[in-house]
Image (spheres, rainbow, N blue to C red):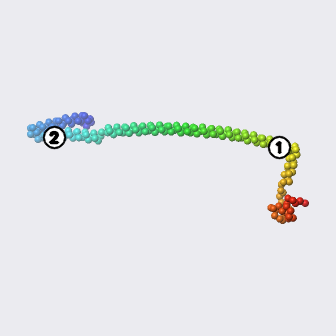
Amino acid sequence: MILSGKRSTTAAATTIMTAGIAIISLGTITSDPARAAGGAFLTMTALTLIALRLIRGWIADTADERRYFHEATQRADDERLKYLAATAALDIERSRMRRDADEATQKAAAQLAADQARLRAHFEEERNELISHSLEAAFKMLTTGRLLEAAQDHRRAVIPFPTATRATEATGPISRGIHQSGTPADQRTTT
């Protein structure tokens, strides 16, 4: 095809235009208008061919756009690689932080278990010591007879519940501890 190569199209157009100018000159010299018109037609054809080549180059030449597209693609690839590197670094940092948090949780759980065991042992020791002291004190009180005295003192200190007969005897305010006779309740003797 004639319009396929830029150099071949330019060479063909130059050749046709040179031939057209020569025919125009020959037609003018010989006073032959048909030959001069044919030469003008060849010259216009060559100029049209050159114009079409320039228009095709202007419309279809995508070298600048290809270069721009290649540069934009390269920048996008660079940005994508930077993003992937940043994402990988972020994932590594997250996994490190998660690992550190898990280790800290495990250490805290181990420390908690150790503290609980230590406190449990201390509690058991104090409990056993209190039981031992209580048993020793009970044994001493039992052997000396003070346990029976304490039980009897405890019975004396207990306030009995009012019964029906005692409720009829008390006509005064019981909350103040004064009996009907006017003597305080703890000074009265029961008959």
Left or right, 73 with reference to 182: left
Q: Nearer the viewer, residue 119 or 178?
A: 178
* Residue 161, quarter of the rendered image: bottom right
Left or right, 109 with reference to 53: right
**Circle 1 is placed at which residue position?**
137
What residue do we see at 86% from left, 64% from top? 182
Left or right, 108 with reference to 120: left
Q: Quadrant of the N terminus?
A: top left
Q: Nearer the viewer, residue 179 or 148?
A: 179
Q: Is residue 111 above or below residue 177?
A: above
Q: Nearer the viewer, residue 113 or 179?
A: 179
Give the secondary structure at mark 2. helix
Residue 64 pos. (x, y %): 32, 39
**Circle 2 is placed at which residue position?**
40
Cα separation, mark 1 vs mark 2, equals: 142 Å
Residue 7 pos. (x, y %): 25, 34
Amino acid type at circle 1 is Ala
Amino acid type at circle 2 is Ala
What residue do we see at 62% from left, 38% from top? 107
* Residue 51, quarter of the rendered image: top left
